Amino acid sequence: MSLFHRAAMRGLLAAAVIVGAGSAFAQSDLKIMAPAAPGGGWDGTARAMQQALTGAGIAKSVQVTNVPGAGGIVGLAQLINQGKGDANQLMVNGFVMVGAILTNKAPVNLTQTTPIARLTEEALAIVVPTDSAIKDAKGLAAAIKADPAKVTWGGGSAGGVDHIAAALFTQEAGADPTKLNYIPFSGGGEALAAIIGGKVTAGVSGFSEFEGQIKAGKLRLIGVTSANRLANVDGPTIKEQGINLEITNWRSVVAPPGLTAEQTKALTDIVKKMNDSPQWKELLKQRGWDAAYLDGEAFGAFLKAENERVNKVLTSVGLVK
Amino acid sequence: MDTFVSLGQGFLVALEPMKLLYALIGVFLGTLVGVLPGIGPALTLALLLPVTFKLDPTGSLIMFAGIYYGGMYGGSTTSILINTPGESASMITALEGNRMAKSGRGGPALATAAIGSFVAGTLATIGLAFFAPYLVALAIKFGPEDYFALMVLAFVTVSATFGDSPLRGLTSLFVGLALGLVGIDILSGQSRLTYGVPELLDGVEVTTLAVGLFAIGEALYVAGRRHVAPEEVEPVRGSLWMTREDWARSWKPWLRGTALGFPIGALPAGGAEIPTFLSYNIEKKLSTKPEEFGHGAIEGVAGPEAANNASAAGTLMPLLTLGLPTSATAAILLAGFQQYGLNPGPLLFAEKPDLVWGLIASLFVANVMLVVLNLPLVGLWVRLLAIPQPWLYAGILVFAAMGTMAANPSPVELMMLLIFGLLGLMMRRYDYPIAPMVVGLILGPMAEAQLRRALSISLGDPVALVQSPIAATLLAIALAALVAPYLMKGLDRFRATED
């Protein structure tokens, strides 16, 4: 969204903002929406934020609400329509929402929100069963080049980060991504069972989902999708094996539209303070999340770039027409 | 032998006074949550996670396990008494259980459910302690084609819930299947039948349909007929407890239900509902009094209740041994483990034996607590039926709406609940069975996804569907179950003409 557009919207909402301005700095009671059911990654992030914010004394009380539905679109719509101008409201979101908005041709999108900051990222891992003939990324690429349809991928929901990573890998391997044979599974457990059981050629998902099985020798790590090798992980990146694939599942927070510059700054300060707190650092270590803090203009630009990239990939696999 | 020693040490952990207290809190909360329609164990655990962070890991996991088991127990109570399943795995229990309650046999129905749950929970926990590694190795072998075959078998058994008219039963089933198509197609990511309503993208929630059809529909129906032909409900007729005959008719269904629920619960995509369908069907076939089915047969409560509790223990198996969360509740339990920096999986048994065996031992403890907690309550629960109907049903409407809103706070969800309630009213009025519709909504999307996954992996070759020995066996059983009754009938007629 252009600056002009944003300014115009602010003008329209001036009245609402003035009404809300009184509470702008009374951030003792913060609300964080997890646009997903309890138990998922976004819910986990929201509740971890709650723990860090109250633990570090940055906010007096933090209320976490769950608005599940459609990869977060239902929650996003609620944030945009009902949360407008509410300077005490935050929403957790992430890479998956970008894809969900595009595939479902949602009437709302992330540019309608006030971006606050990116918090964490997690590298994906590509794995094969231990008894597979494929040993490394080159081997997997060769199999894909021979016949992309015969290489079946198991991972999370269609249009999600796993699916996009599989499509990018296929493309970088020099094969036609429209022939990608990706089998989405609903829960992490089901996908993992199918991969260990050798029902699919390769699996792709967040590294932490595979970690235990890799250590236990049930899965072979082909590579991780981060730019650099992960700390404490004995395994190469995909990139260093000559396949130009770099993708991480990031999570961030956004605020409702219609906030003044001061309100936005106040929220950003709160989130930044939380990010710097020892409580948050401890939580990151516990959950195995990597810090990836990015705020302000840079975060806005990042959102835009990811949106374009995802759109391109989803179009190439036929999910976005 | 090692297992005995480890389990013994586990009991030492689980029987510490503080751990017992955690277990008691857990089963109490779980029972409460199971009783309230729409609020499931998954939501409760998620809400409690931040609270329990300060407790020690073993204590809070013991509490979580108590909630999980308690939820499975509690779900049957409202199913039986007021035809309102607390969660979808208790739906089948409502079919016979509520009939029993209406004819004054609510006490025995609750008792057979509680004791059956105890038997199943205990046996399945023994299975979890002793056979987990072997069964999990087998469960992993299940591929999409095998799941599809299991779904086919479940579909065949649905006919047991049809009642008197197969045509009406099929109509109800197909409406359920159509509802199952609503939302994002899991394999292509495209939306179907959502008409631009974002709340519909995730499909129709099973609990919303079940609570709408059962609870709201029932309340409206009772209200509508109150002055026309009021239904006489006797809270208690005959013994409040199970008679000798009740015991004789219950123990085999308990064991069979356990045998179905435990392995299917252990499958990564098995779930708690399918074994209850299968159990109901088997009990109907094997019963010495099949004519009682549909009018309050105790076997129809005993079997499915045992099955859903056994499946709860089954679900813990892939979680503990492989770190595979196979249900929403298991996923949150996994998050609970991770909160303490524990990674369930092949290494957990070796690295944290205290915790794992303490947890397993506490499952036994939770089971005993639940049966002790629930049996004396039977007398109290059946008094619910003595509450004047207008009050009772007003209460049901409030709790049904509240439960739905707690799980999914959106006006669209509430509208759906109301529409399903009206649909339930009409179906009762015109004598259409309700259960097949919910079954269709549960099985339809699962069967579709597994079929398409199987075909996608085999590059469109349908032979793959029967190539796996597991799938072939399951399909053969399904075929036999479908054809056998007709063959028998034909044979009988053949014999009759010979005479």
Image (spheres, coloured by chain):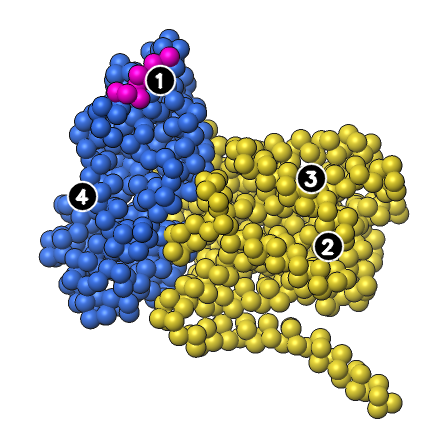
Q: What residue is disc 1 on?
A: A13
Q: What residue type is labelled 1?
A: Leu
Which residue is labeled 3 in the image? B216
**Would you identify the image quadrant in which residue B404 lies?**
top right
Q: Residues within 10 Å of mark 3 (few under 14, many from 20)?
A: many
- Mark 3 lies on a secondary structure that is helix
Q: Determine the CA span between mark 4 and mark 1.
A: 47 Å
- In-image side of B107 versus B66 (left or right): right
Query: Which quarter of the rendered picture does the C terminus of chain B lie within?
Result: bottom right
Give how far across and how far down residue B234 sits, in percent. 86, 42
The residue labelled by disc 4 is: A231
Which portion, as a residue range, is magenta? A7-15
Q: Mark 2 or 3 closer to N-term?
A: 3
Q: Position of residue A142 (x, y in %)?
A: 17, 67
Residue at 16%, 54% (x, y): give it: A238
Residue ID for mark 2? B432
The amino acid sitting under disc 2 is: Tyr
Q: Chain B is drawn in which colour?
A: yellow
